[in-house]
């Protein structure tokens, strides 16, 4: 564990950038990939068993949903890009456990698990993946562009880092209106190298905006390790450039993530923006079509050994919270629910092409083009008719 030197800070704000126990240790060899140091999970006998089971239920729902999405993609039921949360279930569930229903969430294109955990019915999420009219975005958004204002999920963004300035603007609006809500904005580790990341953190720190930026560090930017793309691979330390509080947490432990998320959100709600780095794993390739050939067999075996769903299930059995039979019954229940969602999605109709532009703008815009693909930009004027032809 490392602690940054305290830096001066505007009066009233906490001055330290801290790391927490069970951090990911930095590897000093150039190009070597940092791996989480996994201490034996501490006993959580004081935790409410019902809460522990609910955490596992949510993680398992994401796992089975994403597995079904991968299967549907190979069956050509899902088109376009498709990025899965496999391996990040603990991070997703832990992070959102501390958000109030009125808080806002912005995500990137790896968003299915966030949508489900935020409370959107899995059948509507699956329908969106299938591009059907009953989907979250009426079938026009697909995997990367889910939006549901009722659940305060404001995207789903396909452009790397596209969500960060928008989330910062939402936090500014909350501050301007003197509302008590906060914004959580998740991003990948590779996004920390783009300009919008630094510009947004700078603005948030200057104006004390109510926002938590969350780096989901699965240790690979597509196929490139963090150590090969970032001169400072301990990404939470980047907050110190803006005198912003930050923390790094083990993203394979949902309870540790929940505790860190609660701390970060509490600070943001007081007007102190926060950077939280959640070190997780990506069990498969960057997207469904990525075979992840850049990983060795030994690395794949290590990933499976740290599978957050399996390790949390083992913890529940070890601590007497549930039996193997209980977890098997829960798995059957979740699998049936996912099968139902897939059947619902397949039965849902495709959107009519005339609705393609219905949600381009929130309000009517003058001269809004509704030209469909293949149609000319301007309709040609009718040819003059000769008098002899009349």
Image (cartoon, rainbow, N blue to C red):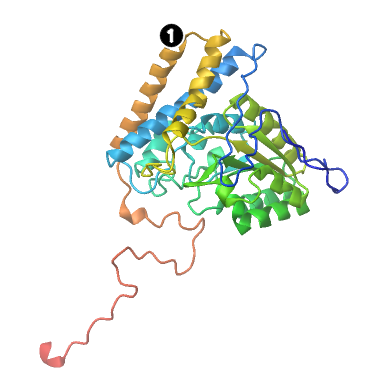
Q: Residue drawn 51% across and 15% down?
A: 314
Q: Residue drawn 37% across and 38% down?
A: 127
Counting from the top left corner in percent of width and height, residue 153 is at 54, 42
Identify the image quadrant of the N terminus. top right
Counting from the top left corner in percent of width and height, residue 112 is at 46, 38
Task: Please name whichever residue, 136 or 261, is drawn nearer the observer in this view of the structure.
Answer: 261
Residue 348 seen from this side: no
**In the image, farthest residue toward the right:** 11
Task: Please name whichever residue, 131 or 109, is drawn nearer the observer in this view of the structure.
Answer: 109
Counting from the top left corner in percent of width and height, residue 76 is at 28, 42
Identify the image quadrant of the C terminus. bottom left
How many neighbours does mark 1 have within 10 angstroms: few (below 14), some (14-19), or many (20 or more)? Answer: few
On screen, 85 above or below 59?
Answer: below
On screen, 118 above or below 157?
Answer: above
Q: Residue drawn 36% across and 22% down?
A: 336
Query: In screen coordinates, is 62 left or right of 72?
Result: right
The quarter of the displayed image where residue 292 is located: top left
Q: Which residue is mark 1?
A: 325
The quarter of the displayed image where residue 295 is located: top left
Query: In screen coordinates, is 97 left or right of 57?
Result: right
Q: Label 1, secondary structure: give it.
A: helix
Residue 27 seen from this side: yes
Q: Residue drawn 62% across and 57% down?
A: 196
Count how many numbered circles sit on residues in the image. 1
Task: Please name whichever residue, 214 or 280, is drawn nearer the observer in this view of the structure.
Answer: 280
The quarter of the displayed image where residue 255 is located: top right
């Amino acid at each position: 564990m490392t602690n940054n030197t305290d830096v001066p800070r505007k009066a009233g704000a906490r001055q330290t950038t801290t790391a927490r126990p069970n951090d990911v240790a930095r590897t000093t060899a150039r190009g070597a990939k940092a791996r989480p140091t996994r201490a034996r999970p501490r006993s959580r006998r004081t935790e409410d068993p019902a809460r522990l089971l609910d955490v596992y239920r949510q993680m398992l729902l994401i796992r089975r949903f994403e597995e079904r999405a991968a299967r549907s993609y190979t069956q050509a039921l899902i088109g376009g890009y498709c990025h899965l949360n496999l391996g990040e279930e603990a991070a997703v569930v832990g992070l959102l456990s501390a958000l109030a229903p009125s808080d806002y969430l912005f995500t990137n294109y790896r968003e299915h698990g966030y949508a489900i955990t935020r409370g959107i019915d899995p059948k509507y999420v699956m329908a969106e993946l299938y591009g059907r009219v009953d989907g979250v975005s009426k079938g026009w958004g697909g995997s990367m562009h889910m939006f549901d204002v009722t659940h305060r999920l404001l995207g789903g963004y396909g452009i790397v880092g596209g969500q960060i300035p928008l989330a910062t603007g939402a936090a500014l609006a909350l501050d301007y209106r003197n509302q008590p809500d906060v914004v959580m904005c998740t991003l990948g580790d590779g996004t920390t190298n783009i300009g919008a990341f630094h510009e947004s953190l700078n603005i948030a720190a200057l104006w004390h905006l109510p926002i938590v930026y969350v780096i989901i560090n699965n240790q690979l930017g597509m196929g490139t390790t963090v150590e090969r793309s970032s001169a400072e691979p301990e990404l939470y330390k980047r907050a110190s450039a803006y005198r912003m509080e930050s923390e790094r947490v083990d993203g394979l432990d949902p309870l540790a993530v929940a505790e860190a998320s609660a701390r970060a959100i509490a600070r943001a709600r007081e007007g102190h923006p926060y950077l939280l780095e959640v070190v997780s794993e990506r069990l498969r390739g960057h997207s469904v079509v990525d075979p992840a050939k850049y990983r060795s067999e030994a690395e794949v075996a290590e990933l499976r050994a740290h599978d957050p769903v399996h390790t949390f299930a083992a913890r529940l059995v070890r601590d007497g919270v549930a039996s193997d039979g209980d977890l098997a019954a829960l798995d059957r229940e979740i699998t049936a629910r996912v099968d139902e969602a897939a059947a619902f999605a397949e039965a849902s109709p495709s959107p009519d092409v005339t609705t393609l532009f219905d949600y381009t703008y929130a309000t009517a815009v003058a001269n809004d083009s509704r030209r469909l693909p293949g149609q000319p930009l301007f309709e040609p004027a009718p040819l003059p008719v000769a008098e002899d032809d009349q």
